[in-house]
Amino acid sequence: MKKPGLTTWIIIAMIAGIITGLLIHHTASIYWIGKFADGMSILTDVFLRLIKMIIAPLVFSTLVTGIAKMGDTRAVGRIGAKTLSWFIGASLISLLLGLLIMNLVDLGNNLHLPVPEVSEAVKLETDSLTLKSFITHIFPRSFAEAMASNEILQIVVFAIFFGIATAAIGEKGKIFIRALDALTDIILKITGYIMLFAPVASFAAVSVILALKGPEILITYGKFILIFYLSVLLLWLLLISISYLWIGKKVFVILGNIKDQVLLAFTTASSEAAFPRLIEELEKSGCPKKIVSFVLPLGYSFNLDGSMLYMGFASLFIAQAYGMHLSFGTQLTMLLVLMLTSKGVAGVPRAAIVVIAGTLSMFHIPQQGLLLLLGIDQILDMARSATNVVGNSLASAVISKMEGVLDD
């Protein structure tokens, strides 16, 4: 008999948390509800500290190896420039769509969660953010200081320089890249260990919010899932429409050929599961192997459209839940932060959680809000994974058309 997986345990913990929270909400006094919330917060704080522990080394190792393996920027050439331009455009569309929809529906404001004391002492004056302060802040005075304080943007800047320089020195650099590859594997193994604690954190987070807020919060969960799935469909329409401008009706041929791989990614909640057969199906659709072999692997690191949509979506939802109004300038800054940091850990299991945690930390938004979504993350991840497959497949076809090698 197959043992229950992590997702199963998280779902079980979420259900147990709902039942426990509702029982306490309806039977305990306000005093004991507060005591219960204080006790459970220890579990959530431990999980959040473990997540924060791996953010800095994971961003650095994955981003450096990704840049270095691309080789010298001149060698990447014409195809690389077109591919990265497409990826950046698709990522911006995904992030903007997530932020726009959350501003329109204003879903998180229904929760009215109290800001934890730990965040009140370091609350960010979001309205005072300026372009000058943002630009000067992203350049580190010390790499060690950036790592110690989990300054993700500063780590990204250093990693970009480090990755390009590592690729430029040739064979000597490859030795260090192999070491960083090993470091990445070690950190991913640590991530797996940390995620074993996720069901406990999920139980604690859900039970506390149900005890404090009652059954009304369940309506918010349902609305969140529904609105996110509608947002995913809208993103699909945008990506298909933009691709249609380049490849015309061929876009429907591509979608028809990859439908099984999209379904596989959806049911397994893993875009990587569809990767092997996806290459084959795109070749059958008329995309040359040399283009597909370049675009798809790069896309699985730099072009996860579904994940990008979710990052903007979830970050703003959590800010709204704590009643933190973010100005237009601050949201634009958040978009740029997500744009950069997501390129460092895209493709990593639970990457969205790590990236959102780092972003919330930078804007001093309580990270406890991230745990509110952990229980439904699997449902959301199914849509994200399917979207990632669609986005990378369309990118392969469009780049092939730009190069004049798409077989009609």
Image (spheres, rainbow, N blue to C red):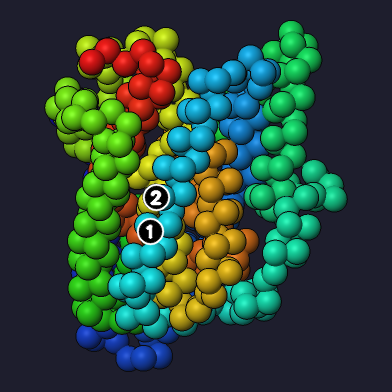
Residue visible at 41% across and 50% down in the picture: 93
Q: Is residue 277 left or right of residue 196?
A: left
Residue named by callout 2? 94
Is the C-beta separation of discs 2 and 1 under 8 Å? yes
Give percent across and percent down for residue 121.
Answer: 67, 78
Give percent across and percent down for residue 223.
22, 68
Residue 165, position as x, y percentages in the image: 77, 24
Element on which disc 1 rests: helix
Q: Is residue 88 left or right of residue 111?
A: right
Other residues around mark 1 within 10 Å, as few (<14) / some (14–19) / many (≥20)? many
Q: Would residue 54 appear left or right of 128 to someone viewing this image?
A: left
Q: Is residue 328 left or right of residue 141?
A: left
Question: Residue 407 placed where, x, y %?
Answer: 27, 12
Tell me: residue 404, above or below residue 223: above
Q: Which amino acid, mark 2? A: Ser
Q: Amino acid at mark 1?
A: Gly
Which residue position holds label 1?
98
